[in-house]
């Protein structure tokens, strides 16, 4: 166990506080109108399709990088697993948001990934998508629905999950190679997070 205090993060690394949240019974949906011109559909994504949407949702502003660093084989294995479901928000024929539900642990569902592109930010699409995630997750015989977020994500992500009915239960510090210096993301990604060489 670490003592209280400050700890150096090595050059070339990024550090983030990860908050784990859960709900143990289905939360009531928060009212929101259906976003105009948007439909939600389950998809069977290819690795290229998935990576493109992943980058557009979280790779530029929020410094998502976990799935970018995976090999095609690793990512394909997850996406092909019968315990994983991916739903896309389609606007004008283009996926502009998605949610990924992972049922691979018995009696649980993880909201593995969730978000919308800048095209849908502020439109109510995120709330609509969360209502769908909660409804879909609890259609299966689960006892726990969980998610995690971090300080590299949208600044309101933690508050959004709490307002959606999730309760924080654990925090961790994650230190990883800076994906910009590793060539996984553009150097101007995650502008609010400094690059320390």
Image (tube, rainbow, N blue to C red):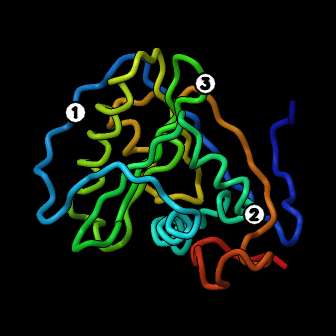
Query: Which numbered disc covers residue 105?
Result: 3
For disc 1, the neighbor class at 10 Å (few under 14, some 14 to 19, many from 20) is: some
| Precedes in sequence: disc 1 or disc 3 | 1
- Report how far apart the C-alphas of labels 1 and 2 lie in the structure: 35 Å
Write the residue at 28% across / 67% down: 120
Above or below, 196 against 95 in this view is below
- 180 or 86: nearer the eye? 86
Q: Which quarter of the image is occupied by the N terminus?
A: top right
Residue 184 position within the rendered picture, expressed as x and y whole percent measured from the top left: 71, 75
For disc 2, the neighbor class at 10 Å (few under 14, some 14 to 19, many from 20) is: some
Q: In what element is the residue under mark 3?
A: loop
Which residue position is annotated with label 1? 29
Q: Are marks 1 and 2 in contact (CB under 8 Å)?
A: no
For disc 3, the neighbor class at 10 Å (few under 14, some 14 to 19, many from 20) is: few
Please give the count of numbered marks on the rendered protein: 3
Which residue position is annotated with label 2? 14
* Picture quadrant where residue 142 is located: top left
* Picture quadrant where residue 186 is located: bottom right
Write the residue at 82% across / 51% down: 6
Camera-nearest label, 1 or 2: 1
| Precedes in sequence: disc 1 or disc 2 | 2
- Report how far apart the C-alphas of labels 1 and 3 lie in the structure: 25 Å
Write the residue at 22% across / 33% down: 29
Residue 197 position within the rendered picture, expressed as x and y whole percent measured from the top left: 85, 79
* Picture quadrant where residue 57 is located: bottom left
Q: Are marks 1 and 3 in contact (CB under 8 Å)?
A: no
Residue 141 position within the rendered picture, expressed as x and y whole percent measured from the top left: 41, 16
Q: In what element is the residue under mark 2?
A: strand
- Report how far apart the C-alphas of labels 3 and 2 lie in the structure: 29 Å
């Amino acid at each position: 166990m670490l003592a209280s205090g400050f700890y150096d993060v090595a050059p070339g690394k990024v550090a983030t506080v990860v908050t784990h949240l859960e709900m143990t019974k289905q939360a009531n949906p928060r009212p929101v109108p259906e976003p105009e011109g948007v439909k939600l559909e389950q998809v069977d994504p290819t690795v290229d399709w998935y990576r493109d949407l992943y980058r557009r949702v979280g790779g530029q502003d929020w410094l998502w990088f976990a799935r970018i660093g995976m090999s095609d084989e690793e990512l394909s294995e997850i996406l092909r697993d019968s315990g994983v479901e991916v739903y896309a928000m389609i606007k004008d024929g283009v996926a502009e948001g998605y949610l990924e539900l992972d049922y691979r642990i018995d009696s649980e569902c993880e909201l593995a990934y969730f978000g919308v592109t800048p095209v849908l930010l502020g439109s109510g699409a995120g709330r609509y998508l969360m209502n769908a995630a909660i409804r879909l997750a609890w259609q299966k015989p689960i006892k726990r629905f969980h998610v995690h977020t971090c300080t590299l994500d949208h600044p309101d992500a933690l508050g959004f999950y709490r307002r959606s009915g999730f309760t924080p239960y654990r925090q961790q510090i994650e230190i990883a190679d800076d994906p910009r210096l590793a060539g996984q993301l553009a150097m101007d990604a995650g502008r609010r997070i400094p690059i320390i060489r």
